[in-house]
Image (tube, rainbow, N blue to C red):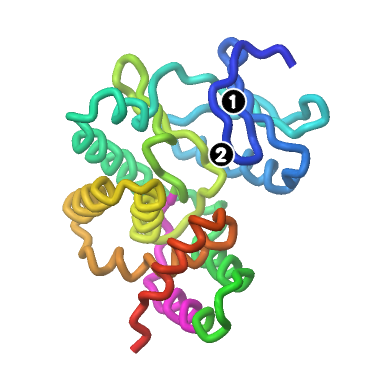
């Protein structure tokens, strides 16, 4: 492989730049089905008209599966927050605006968020009694069909030189309840150790979307339980603390 440079390294994948292309190369043990599903998710979201990198190809590089997309020049919101800490709340507000623009769309061919969460809770190591209660709570939550990113965080938004946001990493996209998507973003901030940003994010989301804070909080144990399936040990411990604080009365 002779790409221009490594853009990022994440668990089970390395992302390279090759001219005007971005190549995400997955580790050898990464499931072919997961790679193809990620590409299909992104291709379906492309049809919504949001500003996202376009899929160019899915192939193999040195025997490893890879997804090639457009390369987007710019800085992530995460980078901008580090470079301009005095503007952090402004960037969090921008993240919320971007998330609401996503939720304004529908993508009926995507997996239903509730179905995905039911599967994850069922495959978790959580006690059977708690799993039953989580399934019951999940089934009782309102059924929506909004486009949900599934992992919207500052590192998944690139701001180009002219200030245009581009949303990346659609591997976890589903259709479902926007407040579940917000609960996921909130927990992402918490898992990163930035509780202050988490609270600022949740306050901004609830205000801008006219959503009761308690409603988003009702989703948090469900989202935490579904995320605990693939988290590292430290993350699982924190996520399980969110599951275990549920009042089941």
Mark 1: few, some, or many residues within 10 Å (few <14, many ≥20)?
A: many
Q: Is residue 161 magenta?
A: no
Q: Position of residue 147 (x, y in %)?
A: 43, 50
Q: Position of residue 10 (x, y in %)?
A: 57, 36
The span picked out in magenta is 133-148
**Residue wearing tag 1:** 69
Along the viewing direction, whichever of 29 and 172 lies nearer the viewer: 29
**Residue wearing tag 2:** 42
- The quarter of the picture where residue 57 lies is top right
Q: Decide if residue 74 is on the left or right side of residue 198.
A: right
Mark 2: few, some, or many residues within 10 Å (few <14, many ≥20)?
A: many
* The C terminus, quarter of image: bottom left
Q: Write the residue at 25% across / 39% down.
A: 92
The Cα–Cα distance between marks 1 and 2, rounded to whole angstroms, is: 10 Å
Q: Earlier in the sequence, mark 1 or mark 2?
A: 2
Q: Write the residue at 41% across / 51% down.
A: 191
Along the viewing direction, whichever of 44 and 190 lies nearer the viewer: 190
């Amino acid at each position: 492989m002779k790409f221009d440079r490594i853009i990022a390294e994440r668990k089970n994948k390395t992302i390279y730049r090759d001219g005007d292309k971005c190549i995400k190369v997955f580790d050898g043990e990464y499931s072919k089905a997961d790679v193809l599903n990620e590409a299909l998710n992104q291709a379906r979201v492309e049809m919504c008209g949001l500003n996202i990198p376009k899929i160019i190809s899915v192939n193999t590089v040195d025997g490893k599966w890879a997804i090639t997309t457009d390369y987007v020049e710019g800085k992530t919101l995460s980078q901008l927050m580090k470079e301009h800490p005095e503007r952090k709340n402004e960037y969090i507000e921008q993240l919320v605006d971007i998330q609401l623009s996503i939720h304004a769309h529908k993508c009926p061919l995507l997996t239903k968020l509730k179905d995905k969460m039911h599967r994850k809770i069922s495959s978790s190591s959580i006690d059977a009694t708690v799993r039953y209660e989580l399934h019951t709570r999940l089934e009782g939550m309102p059924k929506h069909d909004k486009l949900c990113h599934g992992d919207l965080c500052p590192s998944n938004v690139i701001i180009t030189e002219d200030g245009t946001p581009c949303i990346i990493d659609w591997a976890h996209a589903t259709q479902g309840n926007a407040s579940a998507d917000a609960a996921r973003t909130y927990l992402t901030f918490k898992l990163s150790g930035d509780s202050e940003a988490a609270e600022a994010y949740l306050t901004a989301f609830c205000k801008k979307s006219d959503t009761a804070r308690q409603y988003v909080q009702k989703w948090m144990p469900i989202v935490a339980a579904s995320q605990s399936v693939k988290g590292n040990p430290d993350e699982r411990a924190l996520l399980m603390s969110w599951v275990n604080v549920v009042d089941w009365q």
